[in-house]
Amino acid sequence: MTPKILFTAGETQFAQYREPLTAALAEVGVSADLGRDHAPNEVDYLVHSAHSGEVTDFTPFTRAKAVLNLWAGVETLVTNPTLTQPLARMVDNGMTEGMSEWVAGHVLRHHLDLDTFTLNQTGWSHPPVPPLARDRRVGFLGLGRLGRAAAEMLAALNFDVAGWSGSPKNIPGIDTFHGPEGLAPLLARSEILVLLLPLTDGTRNILNAERLAQLPHGAVVLNPGRGPLIDDTALLAALDSGQVGAATLDVFRQEPLPADHPFWAHPRVTVTPHVASTTRPQSASRVIAENVRRGEAGEPFLHLVDRAAGY
C-alpha cells in the first residue's frame, strides 16, 4: 500500500519542498502520496513544523508511524501529551554547515572587532590590534552535532576552543568540560561564548546573572541555540555594566522579537532573525525520505527524540 505523507509545515514551505521531497523519495525507492489534505486516520507520516501551528492535536492520526520534524528544536513537541507517535528531529548536513558558518562568521567579526570599522569609523585611526586566533579563547555551551561541528571549524581556524556538555565528550583538539562542576571553568575561560544547547528544564536560563558574572570581563555572547537559554534581564544588565561587551542573538523567547524589546535599541546587541541554521529543502528532504524508507522497511528511524531527555 502506498504510504500517505501529510505535510503540515505550511503552504509556502510545501511549495518549496514538494519537488525535492518527491525526488528524494524516488531516490530511496519509495512511492508515496505526498499532500496537504489527507484525512488524519489515513496518514502514515507527518512532515511537521511546530512553527506552523497547523497540527497541535495528534490524537486523530491513529495510523501514523512517525512525526518527522523539519527543525532540530523539538521543545514544543516533547511536552505535547497527544503526540504518542515516534518523533524524529531534523539532523541534516545542510543545517550543520549553515550553523558552523554563522558561528564562524560572527566569532571572526567580534574577534577582529570589525564593527569598529563598519559601523563606528569616522576617520583614519588605529584601534587596538586584536590577538591572533590562537590567543583568543572561544567557549561552547553544547557539544552535540551542531556545537561540535562549529567548534571544530573554529579550531581549524586556530582558535583556542573549549566546550561544555552535560555528559563527557572526547573531541580531538578541543578541551572539554562536563557536568555541573565543569560549567564555571568553561565560562571563566570564554572570551567569546557560543550557546548551542537544546532547550530543556535543565538548560533554561542556564546563562543567568550568576553565570554571566563568571565570564571574563567584556566577553562576547553568541546565541544561535534557543532564546530561553539566556535570562534576558540579566544579559541586559551585564551589557549595561560592561561585564558583557557585546551580544549577537539569533533566537528569542518570543519570535518575531517584539518591536519594543530592548535588544533592538541596545548599542551592544546585534539581532539576526533566526537565520543561523535554516532548514534547506534539498538536504532536509533526503533526511525525511530516508526515515520514510526506514519506516516502510520496518527499520529503526534516524534521529529519534528521547522524550525523557527532551531532545
Image (tube, grey):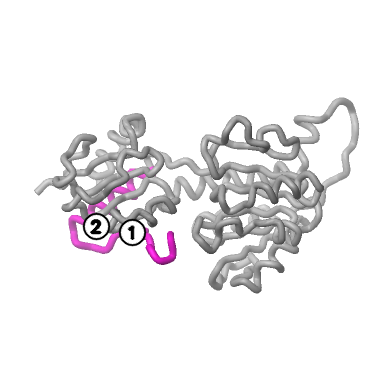
Q: Is residue 91 left or right of residue 127?
A: left
Residue drawn at the location 69% of the way across and 44% of the way down: 247
- 144 vs 34, left or right, is right
The quadrant the C terminus occupies is bottom left
Task: Give x and y (percent) for residue 207.
Answer: 65, 56
Residue drawn at x 32%, y 36% as measured from the top left = 17
Marks 1/2 in contact by CB < 8 Å: the verdict is yes
Relative to the observer, which residue lies in front, 24 or 68? 68
Magenta segment includes 303: yes
* x, y percent for residue 260: 63, 31
Whether residue 153 is visible, yes or no, is no
Q: Residues within 10 Å of mark 1 (few under 14, many from 20)?
A: some
Inter-mark Cα distance, 1 to 2: 8 Å
Q: Is residue 288 left or right of residue 159?
A: left
Disc 1 secondary structure class: loop
Q: Residue furthest left?
A: 1
Find the magenta span and give its range. Answer: 283-311
* Mark 2 secondary-structure assignment: helix
Q: Earlier in the sequence, mark 1 or mark 2?
A: 2
Q: Amino acid at mark 2?
A: Arg
The total of numbered circles placed on residues is 2
Q: Residue at x 55, y 45 (%)?
A: 253
User: In the displayed structure, would residue 168 be above or below residue 41?
Assistant: below
The amino acid type, in three-letter code, at marker 1 is: Leu
The residue to which callout 2 is attached is: 294
Q: Which residue is mark 1?
A: 302
